[in-house]
Amino acid sequence: MLLEGKVALVTGGARGIGAAIVRVLAREGAAVAINYAHSGEQAKALAQRIVEGGGKALPYAADVRDAEAVRRMIAQIRDDFGRLDAVVNNAIAGRQHGALTEASDEDFRTAFDFGCMAIIHMIRAVRPVMREQGGGRIINIVTELWNLAPEEWSVYMAGKGAMVGISRSLARELGPDNITVNMVAPGWMADEKVDTESEGSKNFARSLPLRRHGSAEEIGNACAFLMSDLASYITGAYIPVTGGRVTQVGL
């Protein structure tokens, strides 16, 4: 297993792509801290399934936009597991799609809070822990839309664009602490909210070079790789997991 003995935190890990990442990391041997803000029942159920399958997982409630809540969560994870090797910044909420005329200032503030401030709160909290341990891994979940830049996604792009910029700069700044900072950019992935049998989904799959819809677990696979010893010399990378829809970095 790629991650045996490691401890990883996934924010927004109770549902969707976050839950898929959690399942993959647990399958690869990591003990997983499942962060949630409002999906407590889902987080607890997911942790229980992992434990029943022989893995290790615990749920942790915290709004990642709250710096003090993040600090308390990191301290609790360290108390529970003894260490923290990796963080996947996945949590997001609020409006994502819509014309500029429909978007409020609050929509943009929410996107920026999740795409920028939540990442800063997390890295400020985990950096001392990782530095003391001799290093660590930060993985930020960005988006293929950073390359595609379609209309009516300005709110979403405001947050994710901030995340891309932070990732690139902090990869350099945290490198001397042996902390890598990388990005995984999902395409439209199939999770529990996607009907892969719908005509729209099938048409989308046929449009991709790989001719299939990607599963949410394939985002987890990319995260597991970046956390593993196989990726020890990779930092500042932007990895599109898009079935070939994005074929160049385009930064």
Image: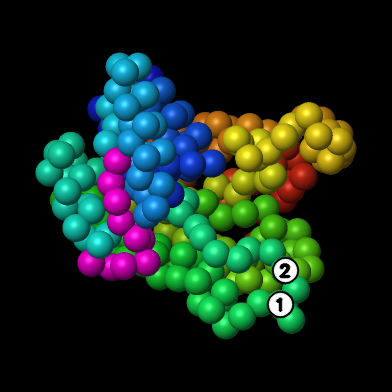
Residue shown at 51% from the left, 60% from the top: 93
- Tell me the amino acid under the disc marked 1: Glu
158 inside magenta stretch: no
Q: Going by the image, does 86 lie left or right of 144?
A: left
Residue 209 visible to an observer of this rendering: no
For the residues labelled 2 and 1, the Cα–Cα distance comes to 6 Å
Quarter in which the C terminus is drawn: bottom right
At numbered mark 2, what does the secondary structure look like: helix, strand or loop?
Answer: loop
Disc 1 crowd, CA 10 A, few/some/many (<14, 14-19, 20+): few
Residue shown at 74% from the left, 64% from the top: 149
Q: Are marks 2 and 1 in contact (CB under 8 Å)?
A: yes
The residue range painted magenta reads 59-68
Determine the image quadrant of residue 198: top right
Q: How many marks?
A: 2
At numbered mark 1, what does the secondary structure look like: helix, strand or loop?
Answer: helix
Vertical placement of residue 208 versus 74, above or below:
above
Determine the image quadrant of residue 152: bottom right
Residue of label 1? 102
Quarter in which the N terminus is drawn: top left
Give residue 38's position: percent from left, percent from top: 39, 53
Q: Nearer the viewer, residue 239 or 51?
A: 51
- Tell me the amino acid under the disc marked 2: Gly
Vertical placement of residue 113 versus 180, above or below:
below
Q: Nearer the viewer, residue 152 or 27?
A: 152
Residue of label 2? 98
Furthest residue in direction front, as rendered: 41
Give residue 45's position: percent from left, percent from top: 37, 32
Residue shown at 35% from the left, 24% from the top: 50
